[in-house]
Image: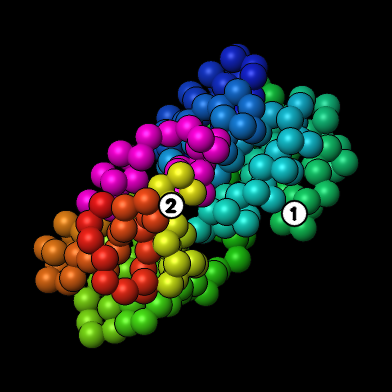
Amino acid sequence: MLVISPDRALVQSVERCTSTLGYVALVADDVDDARGLLLRAEVSAICVDSLLAEQAEQLWRWASETLAGGAPPVILLASPVDAKAPSVVPEFLRGDGARAVAKPVRSEELSRELARVLAERAPREPELLRAGRIALDVERHLLLFEDGGELSLTPTEARLLRCLLERSGEFVSPDELLEDVWGYPPGTGGREVVRAHVSNVRRKLRDLGKDPQLVHSVPYLGYGIGVGEATPA
């Protein structure tokens, strides 16, 4: 569970509750920190301080468009008085019937709201990205092969292949991948991160008896799927 608040006391109370409920709490002071955490870890739900409600909407819309599984459900944390007022829930959450949880957070109330938002999430049809004889099951992080078999991917590997499949037939530079897959600002991040993850995917392909050069690479151009013969970078 991702907790977004600059209030240390609130964060600690939510951490205690999430531990009781069997969840691990990831903590972000603001939505910028939260974006990085959402790119690096799978999150079941987001608990956000009502003081950050406006920024939370921007985060939710970004996550809806960026994350493979869409935006996680959002639970608003508000003062006891505000939590009882329907107007405290931002417009973008009202369609899901969202309610606020009062501060200081109690495990029972958080548990009820968490169970409700998870149960009410609309089931999603599998999203498949196809290129030639392969397809990526975005939700389950699986690479599927037309001739049989499937390859289990980490969330980061799945985002990497998604980026390449969405630009099938093109080369994508390491800098573009660092920005789109890992969320690094332009011009930052080390290219060895990309090389390491591509190497891991190729190793998995080889272990499965598939062509490890499914992910092609050419020096100075980058990485691609469906771009013809190339040499490892």
Name the residue nearer the viewer: 182 or 195. 195
Is the residue 95 above or below the residue 186 in the image? below
Residue 130 in view of the camera = yes
* Mark seen at residue 97: 1
**Residue type of the residue flagged with mark 1:** Gly
Q: Residue furthest front?
A: 220
Left or right: 28 in relation to 98: left
Q: Position of residue 164 (x, y in %)?
A: 42, 62
Q: Position of residue 135 (x, y in %)?
A: 38, 75
Is the residue 89 above or below the residue 210 in the image? above
Taking the spot 51% from the left edge, 44% from the top edge, the residue there is: 179
Taking the spot 63% from the left edge, 55% from the top edge, the residue there is: 64
* Quadrant housing residue 138: bottom left
Q: Position of residue 142 (x, y in %)?
A: 33, 66
* Mark seen at residue 229: none
**Residue span colored magenta:** 177-200
**Residue type of the residue flagged with mark 2:** Ser
Q: Residue furthest top?
A: 9
Residue at disc 1, secondary structure: loop
Q: Are circles 2 and 1 on residues that touch, CB within 8 Å?
A: no
Name the residue nearer the viewer: 35 or 17. 35
Q: Earlier in the sequence, mark 2 or mark 1?
A: 1
Q: Position of residue 115 (x, y in %)?
A: 55, 49
Q: Is residue 192 magenta?
A: yes
Taking the spot 57% from the left edge, 21% from the top edge, the residue there is: 11
* Mark seen at residue 173: 2
Q: Residue furthest bottom?
A: 147
Left or right: 207 in relation to 226: left
Question: Distance from label 2 to label 1 (Cα)?
Answer: 42 Å
